[in-house]
Image (cartoon, rainbow, N blue to C red):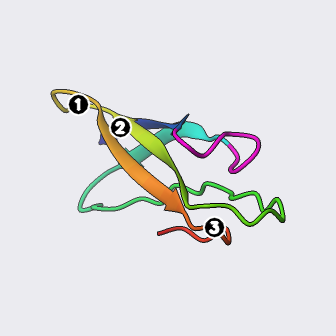
Amino acid sequence: PLVVSYRTVDGTAIAGSDYTPVSGVLFFSGNDTARAINVPVLADGIDENDESFRIILAGPFAAPRELTLTILGDAVFR
């Protein structure tokens, strides 16, 4: 099996204010090619510009990988 750890990291979006921080481990086996990471977005009722945060992936690859997620002003991911 392939094991990949993940964690969220603030960008312009702030954990606890704009989204709920998450971390954990993903397990892949056999022909698995995808896993979901759920990151709750917090609606604060404030009309804001788009904000982003990152998910850092660490596993058996040469260096950590990261994904940037954007929360649109009305609390929708892009």
Most common secondary structure along the magenta stretch? loop
Identity of the amino acid at label 3? Gly
Q: Nearer the viewer, residue 24 or 75?
A: 75
Residue at the image point whose x is 57% and y is 37% from the top: 23
Residue 62's spot in the image, x, y percent? 15, 27
The 10 Å Cα crowd at callout 1, few under 14, some 14 to 19, many 20 or more, is few
- Position of 48 with respect to 67 (left or right) is right
As drawn, the residue found furthest toward the left would be: 62
Residue identified by numbered label 3: 73
Label 1 and label 2: CA atoms lie apart by 8 Å
Q: Nearer the viewer, mark 3 or mark 1?
A: 3
Residues under numbered marks 3 and 1 in contact, where contact means CB atoms less than 8 Å apart: no
Residue identified by numbered label 1: 60
Span highlighted in magenta in the image: 11-20
Residue 14 placement: quadrant = top right
Residues under numbered marks 1 and 2 in contact, where contact means CB atoms less than 8 Å apart: yes
The circle drawn on residue 45 is none
Which sits earlier in the primary sequence, circle 3 or circle 1?
A: 1
Residues under numbered marks 3 and 2 in contact, where contact means CB atoms less than 8 Å apart: no
Q: Is residue 76 above or below residue 63?
A: below
Residue identified by numbered label 2: 3
